[in-house]
Amino acid sequence: MQSVRFPRLAGSVLFVSTVAVGLLVASGPSSGATPSVQKTVNGTLIKRPTGTLAPGAVVSSSSLGHRVFTSASNGFALANVGQAQYPAATTDGGTVWKTDGPALHLNAVQAPLAVTSIGGVNRNIAYAYGSGQVVDVTSDGGNQWYRALFQGLPMAVVQGIGTHLVAFVDGTANGKGVTWQYISKNGGRTWRYNPAVGGG
């Protein structure tokens, strides 16, 4: 099995092209005995936790963290409201933001489910990851979100071929640096391990 070591840079932002990282995954040095990789990771539908904001609730700009825009009008963000993180969306260039799905993480209750970064492909496809072991994805504009729980920490999620998503998961164990590449072709419902460049 091929693996790659990624340096950890505190407070840095990682922008990586699928092809560049794919080459690293495909041609990285072997690190000897490595932890076993999950071949398939299935996502589960995220349901709205009791006592949390309903989808469509207006949130203030001051509650927003990381933001991305897929066009001049459409964007996604993570909103920190109360003791939870929500996906939020705008359709007017950032004037009004509304929750775009159920709470993705409840503080102090669900540490492995923490998300800190968000990305988008178009108005319908968005994903959140970072800090925890999950990648959360919507492919229908926030109507449904699916959560995939990995045996490692997702370090980056990028758009692959077309609307496919590629997740790079840190599977470090026993001091061995291992990065696994997973591909989802169905909006985060299923992720399959695939070491080919950019998912093949």
Image (tube, grey):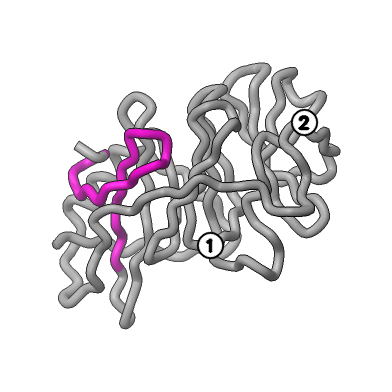
Residue type at mark 2? Trp
Residue depicted at x 25% and y 64%: 37
Quick check: 83 left or right of 166? right
Figure quadrant of residue 1: bottom left
The residues tagged by marks 1 and 2 sit, at their Cα atoms, a distance apart of 25 Å
Which residues make up the magenta segment? 178-198
Quadrant containing the C terminus is top left
Q: Is residue 76 above or below residue 95?
A: below
Q: Residues within 10 Å of mark 1 (few under 14, many from 20)?
A: many
Residue depicted at x 81% and y 26%: 96
* Residue 135 rendering spot, x and y as whole percentages: 48, 50
Residue in front for this viewpoint, 10 or 53? 53
In the image, is residue 186 part of the stretch drawn in magenta? yes
Q: Which residue is mark 1?
A: 132
* Residue 86 rendering spot, x and y as whole percentages: 69, 45
Residue in front for this viewpoint, 17 or 90? 90
Residue depicted at x 20% and y 72%: 31
Task: Indicate the secondary structure of the residue bearing disc 2.
Answer: strand
* Residue 34 rendering spot, x and y as whole percentages: 22, 73
Q: Is residue 100 above or below residue 14?
A: above
Q: Which residue is mark 2?
A: 97
Residue type at mark 1? Gly
Quick check: 8 left or right of 179? right
Task: Indicate the secondary structure of the residue bearing disc 1.
Answer: loop
Residue depicted at x 54% and y 50%: 13
Figure quadrant of residue 35: bottom left
Q: Is residue 136 above or below residue 164?
A: below
In the rendered structure, which disc, 1 or 2, sits on the residue that comes first in sequence? 2
Q: Identify the residue at the far bottom of this view.
A: 174
